[in-house]
Structure formats: structure tokens, C-alpha cells
Image: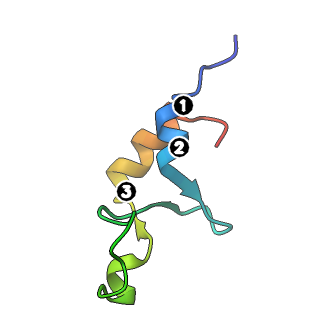
Amino acid sequence: MKLKTHKATVKRVKLTKSAKVVRVKAAKSHLLSHKTDRTKTLIELSPADTARVKKMAPYL
């Protein structure tokens, strides 16, 4: 039986080539000119959250 993918999870996270799960930080839609590059970069998920994401999106 095929597992269902949690679509909201797929929209929020991305898998890198080295199999890390990354997400976008908050406050990234507009007013970005005064924010630092560090604020605007992707952030890696914790090991616990990575395991949860892999369960919710098994085909990611």
C-alpha cells in the first residue's frame, strides 16, 4: 500500500543533494533590503524534525 504525502510539509521544506532537510526562515516575503544575508538564508532542521518530515513526506 502506498503512503500518502503530507502536502503542506512538501511545500515548506526542501531536500538538498547531501540529503539535508532545509526550510525557509520566517519574515521572508517583503521588506528584505535592510535584512542581512544571514537572516535571509535557509536553515537546516534539527534531527528530530528531520525524522518527522521524512515520515510525513516519504517520497521527498
Residue located beneath label 3 in the image: 47
Which residue is pictured at 56% across the width and 35% down the height?
A: 57
Q: CA distance from mark 1 to mark 3?
A: 21 Å
Q: In the picture shown, does residue 36 fall above or below 21?
A: below
Q: Secondary structure at mark 1?
A: helix
Q: Looking at numbered disc 3 in the image, what kind of residue is underneath it?
A: Pro
The count of marks equals: 3
Name which quarter of the figure residue 35 lies in. bottom left
- Residue contact between numbered discs 1 and 2, judged by CB atoms under 8 Å: yes
Q: Looking at numbered disc 2 in the image, what kind of residue is underneath it?
A: Lys
Residue located beneath label 1 in the image: 7
* Residue 33 x %, y %: 37, 85
Which residue is pictured at 40% across the width and 40% down the height?
A: 52
Which image quarter holds the N terminus?
top right
> Pointer 1: residues within 10 angstroms few (<14), some, or many (20+)?
few
Q: CA distance from mark 3 to mark 2?
A: 19 Å
Name which quarter of the figure residue 36 lies in. bottom left
Residue located beneath label 2 in the image: 11
